[in-house]
Amino acid sequence: MATITIRELHMKTGHWVRAAARGRNGVLVLDRGRPAARLLPAEEEISTPFARRKLVRGFEQLPSVHVDSARLLEEDRR
């Protein structure tokens, strides 16, 4: 199992997440020399491709929005 610091995780998050996904034992994250977290590979059922996921009932009836969702959220928060 690879051991890294929180700073290393912060600086290269993508690298360490991909490393954890490839390995069996994951990555141990230390906070001031003490174990704080462990990154482990996701189980198969968790990493189902988006296209094969089932929609929540009623999702199909939601209106189609043809604008930037971030802009709508920004306006809603004002």
Image (cartoon, grey):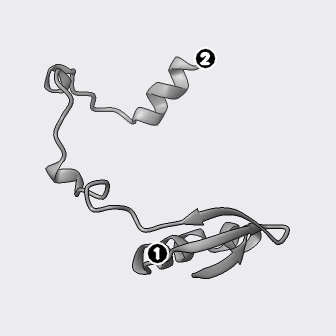
In this image, 5 relative to 54: left or right?
A: right
Quadrant in which the C terminus is drawn: top right
- Image x and y of residue 54, in percent: 16, 40
Q: Which of the 4 image quarters holds residue 72?
A: top left
- Image x and y of residue 60, in percent: 14, 26
Q: Nearer the viewer, mark 1 or mark 2?
A: 1
In this image, 54 relative to 43: left or right?
A: left
- Image x and y of residue 66, in percent: 27, 32
Q: Which of the 4 image quarters holds residue 41?
A: bottom left
Circle count = 2
What residue is drawn where x is 41% and y is 79%?
A: 22
Give the number of the disc on residue 76: none
Question: In the rendered structure, which amino acid carries the disc numbered 1?
Answer: Arg
What residue is drawn where x is 49% and y is 79%?
A: 19
Where disc 2 sits, the SS reads loop
Give the number of the disc on residue 18: 1
In this image, 56 relative to 19: left or right?
A: left
How packed mark 1 is, by other alpha carbons closer than 10 Å (few <14, some 14-19, many 20 or more), is some
Question: In the rendered structure, which amino acid carries the disc numbered 2?
Answer: Arg
What residue is drawn where x is 76% and y is 70%?
A: 7
Where disc 1 sits, the SS reads helix
How packed mark 2 is, by other alpha carbons closer than 10 Å (few <14, some 14-19, many 20 or more), is few
- Image x and y of residue 1, in percent: 57, 82
Residue with the mark numbered 2: 78
Q: Work out whether residue 53 or residue 61 is closer to the camera in this orientation and state it.
A: 53
Q: Work out whether residue 71 or residue 10 is closer to the camera in this orientation and state it.
A: 10
